[in-house]
Amino acid sequence: MAYFDSKDRTVFSPQNEKLEPFYKILEQYNQTIGGSNLFDDLVETYEYLDFVLKEKKEEFKNEPATKN
């Protein structure tokens, strides 16, 4: 699992591939805005989206198949 270290945290690559572009942007701009309030808010949003998408994927996987 890929990751990068920011000022006060470690940011891990997403579990959902749809968030890979977001992760790459965070990694790219870590050197210039890492540690700022803006960057921290972006990382929190990224981590929240990754969590929600993971939960939705698990819900879908565990959902019983419907018969018509």
Image (tube, helix red, strand yellow):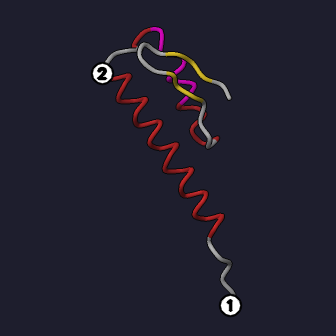
Q: Quadrant of the N terminus?
A: top right
Asked whether, in this view, residue 37 is left or right of residue 6, the answer is left
Regarding mark 2 in the picture, which secondary structure is present there? Answer: helix
Asked whether, in this view, residue 44 is left or right of residue 12, the answer is left
- The answer to which of marks 1 and 2 sits earlier in the sequence is 2
Asked whether, in this view, residue 45 is left or right of residue 24, the answer is left
Is the Cβ of the residue at disc 1 closer than 8 Å to that at disc 2?
Answer: no
State the CA–CA distance, disc 1 to disc 2. 51 Å
Picture coordinates of residue 56, whole percent (x, y): 54, 58
Q: Is residue 1 above or below residue 54?
A: above
The amino acid type, in three-letter code, at marker 1 is Asn
User: Which disc number belongs to residue 37?
Assistant: 2
Identity of the residue drawn at 41% across and 16% down: 8
Identity of the residue drawn at 61% across and 43% down: 16
Crowd rating for badge 1 (residues with CA inside 10 Å; few <14, some 14–19, many 20+) = few
Regarding mark 1 in the picture, which secondary structure is present there? Answer: loop
The amino acid type, in three-letter code, at marker 2 is Asn
Picture coordinates of residue 46, whole percent (x, y): 46, 36
Residue at mark 1: 68
Magenta residue span: 23-31
* 26 in the magenta segment: yes
Give the overall secondary structure of the magenta segment. Answer: helix
Picture coordinates of residue 41, whole percent (x, y): 35, 29
As drawn, which residue projects farthest toward the top? 31
* Nearer the observer, 49 or 25: 49
Identity of the residue drawn at 54% across and 19% down: 27
- Dividing the picture into quadrants, the one containing residue 68 is bottom right
